[in-house]
Amino acid sequence: MKKDKRIPWNQYFMLQAILLSMRSTCERLSVGAIIVRDNRIIAGGYNGAVSGDDHCIDVGCYIRDGHCMRTIHAEMNAVLQCAKFGIPTADAEIYVTDFPCLQCTKSLLQAGIKKIHYLRNYNNDEYAIRLLERKHVAVEQVSVDPSYLNSVIKDKF
């Protein structure tokens, strides 16, 4: 049997989330998220301001109680993109560059997301973790093998 030399799905989707994070307009943390069903991307989002509003990178963050009020989190932007275009999120998976905050975790649960893949730990909320366990939502930390990027750059550019 011939060995598949292609990038594994979980790393492929995580790299897509990383790429999306590069569009972030919040200066505090760049986060990207991809919602996937049946190994197909159905939506993506990054953290940034409401469309048409000022961006943090242009006018600074609007901080209240230690949080940027201007920013919509990447996970929410991806879920809201599905809502806007009538794409069901039930039984989908999400790939996000940072462990979701409590509010995003609750929203993902309500949206029917069945698995959360994340790259980095970020203030992992204890209650969010308990909710995910209680609702039997799988959580997986994904590491990205830099050799995939190195081989693409070396072979293609």
Image (cartoon, grey):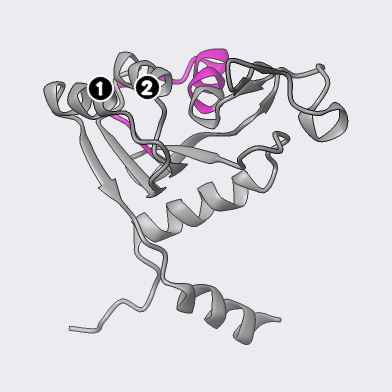
Residue 85 lies left or right of residue 98; in this view the side is: right
In the image, residue 12 lies in the stretch drawn in magenta: no
Q: Please state the extent of the stretch shown in magenta in the rendering.
A: 78-94
Quickly name the residue at label 1.
127
Which quadrant does the N terminus fall into?
A: bottom left
Instruction: State the image coordinates of residue 81 (x, y, percent, origin top left).
Output: 56, 22
Q: Nearer the viewer, residue 84 or 71?
A: 71
Closer to the chain start, of discs 2 and 1, is: 2
Q: Position of residue 83 (x, y in %)?
A: 50, 14
Side of 41 relative to 134 (left or right): right
Task: Residue at 65%, 37% (x, y): give it.
Answer: 28
Report the front residue among 4 and 128: 128
- Percent across and percent down for residue 96 are 44, 41
The residue that appears at 52% across and 28% down in the rendered structure is 78
Q: In percent of the image, x 37 and y 61: which residue is there?
A: 143
Residue 66 is situated, as x and y percent measured from the top left of the image, at 58, 22
Q: Which amino acid, mark 2?
A: Leu
* Most distant residue in the front direction: 65
| Foreground of the two, 139 or 87 | 139
* Residue 102: assigned label: 2
Q: Residue at x 38, y 16 (%)?
A: 107
Q: Are marks 2 and 1 in contact (CB under 8 Å)?
A: yes
Q: Quadrant of residue 6?
A: bottom left
